Amino acid sequence: MQVPRQIPIALALFCLYGCGDNPPPRVTAEESAGTNRYLEAVQEAEALKHTIEERNLQQQQVDQLLRERR
């Protein structure tokens, strides 16, 4: 079985460029604060979504009770 020529070339390029000596860039305090604000906003949005879903469910239950009493 013969290996296609592209595979050894791809592996060589991966090893050459994928295993570099440069570490990933450090996250600055400013970037970290921005990330924290983003995460807080996402959590707040999720909490609001949950609150709205609960409110809608309660409203549906009230509407159902009102329909049953008619």
Image (cartoon, rainbow, N blue to C red):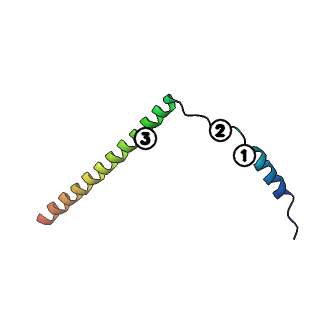
Q: Is residue 70 visible?
A: no
- As displayed, is residue 40 above or below residue 49? above
Could you tell me which quadrant the C terminus lies in?
bottom left
Residue that sits furthest to the front in the current view: 21
Question: To which residue does mark 3 refer?
Answer: 39
Residue at mark 1 to residue at mark 2: CA–CA distance:
10 Å
Question: To which residue does mark 2 refer?
Answer: 23
First reached walking from the N terminus: tag 1 or tag 3: 1
Q: Secondary structure at mark 3?
A: helix
- Residue drawn at the location 48% of the way across and 34% of the way down: 32
Amino acid type at image mark 2: Pro
Q: Secondary structure at mark 1?
A: loop
Marker count (numbered): 3
- Residue drawn at the location 83% of the way across and 56% of the way down: 8
Question: Which of the pair 38/63 is nearer the observer?
Answer: 38
Q: Residue 43, image x and y in percent?
A: 38, 44
Q: Residue 19, image x and y in percent?
A: 72, 46
First reached walking from the N terminus: tag 3 or tag 2: 2
- As displayed, is residue 36 above or below residue 62? above
In the drawing, does residue 40 fall left or right of residue 5?
left
- As displayed, is residue 67 above or below residue 42? below
Residue at mark 1 to residue at mark 3: CA–CA distance:
31 Å
Question: To which residue does mark 1 refer?
Answer: 19
In front of the other: label 3 or label 2?
A: 2
